[in-house]
Image (spheres, coloured by chain):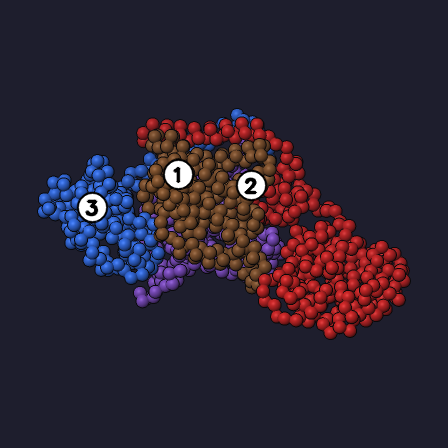
Chain colours: A purple, B brown, C red, D blue
Amino acid sequence: MTDWIATFKRGLSIENPLTILMIGLCATLAVSTKFEGAFFMGLAVIFVLTMSSMIISALRRVIPEQVRIPIFIVVIASFVTIVDLTMHAFLPPVYNFLGVWIPLIVVNCVILGRAEAFAYHNSVSLAVADGLGMGTGYSFVIIVLATFREFVGSGEIVFMNQRIVALPPSYQGPGIVLLFPGAFIIFGFMIAGARWVTERQGRRVVETSKHCTIEEGRAL
Amino acid sequence: MIDMLRNLALLFIGAALVNNILLTRFIGLCPFFGVSSAMETSVGMAGAVVFVMTLASSATWVFWNVLLEPLGVGDFLYIPAFILVIAALVQFVEMYLRKAMPGLYRAMGIYLPLITTNCAVLAAATEAVKPGFFKMNIAYGFGFGEAVVYTLGVAVGFGFALISFAALRERLDVAPVPKIMRGAPMAFVTAGLLSLGYVGLSGMFGI
Amino acid sequence: MELDLVLKAVVALSAIGIVASAALAAASRKFYVEVDPRVEAVLASLPGANCGACGNPSCFGAAEAIVEEKIPITACTAGGQAVADAVAAVLGVEACAVAANVSLRHCGGGRAASRTYDYSGLQSCASVARLAGGDLTCPYGCFGYGDCMKACPFDAIAMDHRGLPVVDLDKCTGCEACVAECPRGRIGLLAMVPSEGAVAVRCNSHDKPKGRKAYCSMCCIACKKCEKACPADAIHVENLNAVVDYDKCTGCGQCVAVCPQECIDLTGRDAMVSSALADGRGPKVDGFVPRETTRLDFAEEEPSE
Amino acid sequence: MDRAPSTPTSMVLSVLVTCVVASAALTFTYEMTRERIAEQERVAREKALKDVLPAATEFTAVDANVLSAAEEAAGDTQVAAVFDAGESGWGILVAPRGYGGPMSMVVGVDRNGKVTGVKIITQNETPGLGSKVMTEPEFLPQFEAWDASEIEKAAKAFDAISGATKSSNGVRKGVLAAGHVYADVLSGEGGGSKQ
């Protein structure tokens, strides 16, 4: 059980797909202009990642090596289509907002990456732990980014079209925050903040500019 | 004939620059940040993307119009079908290149597996082929020639953005950047400014 | 639920599946290519997601680079620690060969050395060297902007608090990438020396000693005290700078003790303290006592007197 | 970790099985959600049409050749669909191109050629600037009472939103296209409009 929790927590902090590994960026920046969009996108990623990791690790002995990528992709694509159809049917406003980004979850590097790196080599329970961990880590970052951007940009946070928190109507937010260039810049500062936090906790993230970040220091 | 060429040219430039898939629509960011740390990897990647994206969209066009559309199952099967086609195509091309043209494989082939997890390839191949994939559910319904030219434009746009960003990032490695912003955070801020330039182009023509 | 829709869907997707897998099966037969088994082994332990996060275009590219020792075994970000251990196990990297020669820095100035102008341009030695010969007054010294650190594929070089590159002897494989990258590497600032044990002269200047002291406190003033004190006749002042003959040098440390400028350090794998610790501290290394001409075997035996 | 062998048969077989299972599962989900999706779309369209044609009760799509004639009449602006609302006129769905790409909007034209209203369904103009075409209170109402048969003349009296000229012109193009569709195709359909 303990290593189940360890895998789960690893996905959240030191191997967070977005801030540390920096994979799966495509949808993050696009979808984080609305809290509601980011929230459901996070749920979708958690669902697809966990389910596909579970199936892949369950079948890992049966899938031949040579043709593993096509099989992984069909499994992931089926879960993505299920999410696509259900969201289209039950949550049309969110579906219209997310639009092209739901099908693109299938090529989201987080899912195929973890399915390959982890699910294909580990037991089902660990794969589910890793899926949940990575998914929650991913959604956490995307929701924080979305809350910031929606609040600053449009002055209010709307969830299932009730206004949760709103600034006085006279507030005229800076438009750039909702635009893509703003997303890049804010995400850049967010990674700097995450790195500063992990560094302050004594876990030195070795950033070698020529290679890549590998976490050193106290074991989790 | 002339205005058919004019349309294709407009479509090409529209896809490459005006609606640049990387810097105005932000599809395909994972390799954009992963590979662009060095110039030669970016050039290799750009070449591979141009080659495979055009091939992929012709394959998906064939599968869509010959198989999925007539059977009427396209609406819900297009995601697994297209990505399966792309993955198989990439793996096949990689094996073929490794065997037949080792030189070309050395320069470009090793980027091919990276294309399967590349959102841009799937997005462009699906957009050019499946009407209504683009958010506005306005049917494009390109012909075969238009689909290939459109994807070629998108791929050239992808390569152009990737290489210009790689050049910037090489300077970034040595620029006097505060310690906490060094590396990836600064790359994101630079990408933000670069995309600001491209957004200025939007709405001119093309799709 | 009409059955024919299910049938049509199954037919459509399976048709694509069959075409795809048949093509792959045929291709894997027809296009079989010999691959170095070690690369194969490393590739098996890499995640294979080809995410490109490690800067290599694909896991296959990364596996080749790791086997050819172009990048360290910890290069894979997506895999994290687990993959790094797996790759290390596959390559048996733990017992990595000890490099014959290692890189050595002939300069002790760093931030203490005086600068002719205040440089705030690109943080690279190559670019500062192009601006009127660099911001360092000393024409031979180390600028400290870390080009060697960036060039080193094995992360063996790190910049210390004095703004000088310190070489980690366990990681240095003697590949000379730093010597090539450093704008003053070829004129003696960085030299390849035997890795076992010796002393290092932390000065590379050939100016008049009086002029040297004006712009750098840590410099060799060619007083020849070390030449007189050396029992093995291994150190000579040539062209106004002390030069060590590493074949004769027994690492006894007499020159380190006697140098008035304290610009000679203990260094080398067999030295009593790690070269990173001894760097820039001359005789002040705690527990250091110069020895007679005994063969360099500090490591095993306690320092006698 | 022993794996299944990579012989050709095992490769083809495993992919085949995955595809069969996947396609069966997807068809099942599609069947489950199909009615709801169709229902959602119909409701959304109905709401938009009702906004521009308040009096109308039910909308029937015009048949194909009328639609294709409408597409010619509209020139380069895309016409997505045309709905006949019986007594209260027609609802024309057009997709002009604004600043940030195509917008989908619906234009209502009553029996005698008066534009009854314009409503924008989806757009991705620049938030805060272009998006004002939807939020600006007196922008969309200005199209009302334009005469669809002489749409060019009516379009002279048009003021765009400052700072969002391209988006405003996009909407204007949509209304123009709807006007042409009415003038060339629908008015001949036995509408009692004056010539």
Task: Residue B6 in the image: state x and y as whole percent.
Answer: 36, 43
The circle on residue D180 is 3
For disc 3, the chain is D
First in residue order: circle 2 vs circle 1: 2
Q: Are marks 3 and 2 in contact (CB under 8 Å)?
A: no
Q: Mark 1 — residue? A: B147
Determine the secondary structure under disc 1: helix
For disc 1, the chain is B
Tell me if D167 is positioned left or right of C273 in this view.
left
Is C197 placed above or below A102 here?
Answer: below
Name the residue: 66% across, 38% down. Answer: C38
Q: Looking at the rendering, in which quadrant would you find the C terminus of chain A?
A: bottom right
Task: Residue A120 in the image: state x and y as whole percent.
Answer: 54, 39
Task: State the separation of the CA atoms marked 2 and 1.
Answer: 24 Å
Name the residue: 42% across, 52% down. Answer: B24
Q: Residue furthest front?
A: B2
The circle on residue B41 is none
For disc 2, the chain is B
Task: State the separation of the CA atoms marked 3 and 2.
Answer: 52 Å
Determine the secondary structure under disc 3: helix
Q: Mark 2 — residue? A: B108
Tell me if A153 is positioned left or right of C204 in this view.
left
Identify which residue, C27 or D65, lies in the foreground. D65
| Quadrant in which residue C230 is drawn | bottom right
Residue C75 visible in image: yes
